[in-house]
Image (tube, rainbow, N blue to C red):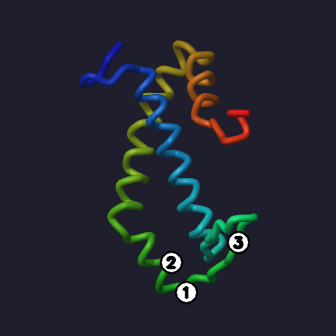
Amino acid sequence: MSYFGLTNEEIVFLYFKNKERLKEYNKILTEKSVELELSLGLGSIVMLKDLTDEQIEMIREHKQYQIIKDINEKLSEVVDLIYDTDPDFVNEIEESTKLTIDDLS
């Protein structure tokens, strides 16, 4: 099946990638801090920056965050329908979005 040229596989993939981004935002909003990683030649340094209530509110109201939330809500309904007909397919696509550098060795 295809919706406006997107296959079920592409829709499910986009949903899970968008969901990951929404989780990142929600973690920032919940913890009221941002984690920054600076890569160095022999390792990396992780820094934590606390956010003010004003900065948290700015993130909540930001267009990018709002769009990510809206996309997630809309795609979740479509993915639920796809899941109802083929849960293994949806689970397989979800797993494919979890590729890490460790998977390449």
Whether residue 26 is situated above or below residue 9 in the rendered picture: below
What residue is shown at x 36% (from left), y 61% (from top)?
64
Judge depth for marks 2 and 3 and give the one in front: 3
Kindly identify the amino acid type of the residue bearing the numbered disc 1.
Answer: Thr
What residue is shown at x 47% (from left), y 45% (from top)?
18
**Residue 67 location in percent, x, y?**
35, 55
Label annotation for residue 56: 2
Q: Are marks 2 and 1 in contact (CB under 8 Å)?
A: yes
User: Mark 2 and mark 3: span between their CA atoms?
Assistant: 21 Å
Q: Is residue 13 left or right of residue 101?
A: left
Q: Which residue is mark 1?
A: 52
Q: Earlier in the sequence, mark 2 or mark 3?
A: 3
Kindly identify the amino acid type of the residue bearing the numbered disc 3.
Answer: Val
Q: Is residue 7 left or right of residue 51?
A: left
Q: Which residue is mark 3?
A: 46
Label annotation for residue 104: none
Kindly identify the amino acid type of the residue bearing the numbered disc 2.
Answer: Ile
Judge depth for marks 3 and 1 and give the one in front: 3
State the residue in front, 57 or 16. Answer: 16
State the residue in front, 62 or 105. Answer: 105
Q: Element at badge 1?
A: loop
Q: Is residue 40 left or right of residue 23?
A: right
Q: Quadrant of residue 59?
A: bottom left
Q: Residue furthest left?
A: 4
Q: Element at badge 2?
A: helix
